[in-house]
Image (cartoon, grey):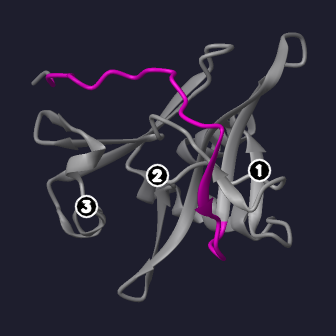
Amino acid sequence: MSRKKTNTYTTRRVGPWSNTARGDSIYISVYCRGTATHSHDKWRIGSITAQVRNGEIFWADSTAGYADHSQDVLHRISPGIGQYLVGNEWVPIDRVSDQDIYTRDDLRIRWRLRCPVCGFSREIAQPRRIYPILATLATLREADNILEIPVREFARRVERLNE
């Protein structure tokens, strides 16, 4: 069965800095600076944050923005890394509530980590399966509750889980 893919990914960014305060949440922020041989300026891909729902920890993409050590507010990022699918239809993020993410069995989530500058891209289907990696990475965070990690290193850790 093929899926009708109506969701398009663009590289537009809105911002730079928002007025949304970071708060006390734990953030794992994924960025790209290219490779050793082809480096580029820092591209903020997205942040993943821990949220507690009904006593259980969920990791979700931060739709409010990217958490950076240099600011107390979030850097605006659009589109975010989260993509949602119900049945065979992509669902725009504005039609998905927080409650849907945690309760709907027919809602599938994937995270798309993409750097439009160098073209590096990885998709993580079923993010719940990498919760152990996220929990481990969260222990490496700094005093401001942020861990910034290059996208290639993040992808290597996820790929090791699949081996």
With respect to residue 105, does 79 lie above or below? Answer: above
Q: Residue furthest right?
A: 36
- Decide if residue 53 is on the left or right side of residue 67: left
Q: Is residue 48 magenta?
A: no
What secondary structure is marked by label 1? strand
Disc 3 versus disc 2: distance between alpha carbons? 12 Å
Disc 1 versus disc 2: distance between alpha carbons? 17 Å
**Segment colored magenta:** 3-26
Q: Residue furthest front?
A: 19
> First in sequence: mark 3 or mark 2?
2
What secondary structure is marked by label 2? loop
Q: Main secondary structure of the magenta part?
A: loop
With respect to residue 98, does 62 lie above or below? Answer: above
Q: Which mark is residue 148?
A: 1
Callout 3: 10 Å neighbours few (<14), some, many (20+)? few
Q: Which mark is residue 97?
A: 3
Rendered-image quadrant of the N terminus: top left
- Decide if residue 36 is on the left or right side of residue 120: right
Between 101 and 76, the residue placed more toward the observer is: 76
Q: Which residue is mark 2?
A: 63
> First in sequence: mark 1 or mark 2?
2
The residue drawn where x is 29% and y is 61% is 101
The residue drawn where x is 74% and y is 38% is 153
For residue 93, what is the image quadrant?
Answer: top left
Callout 2: 10 Å neighbours few (<14), some, many (20+)? some
Disc 1 versus disc 3: distance between alpha carbons? 27 Å
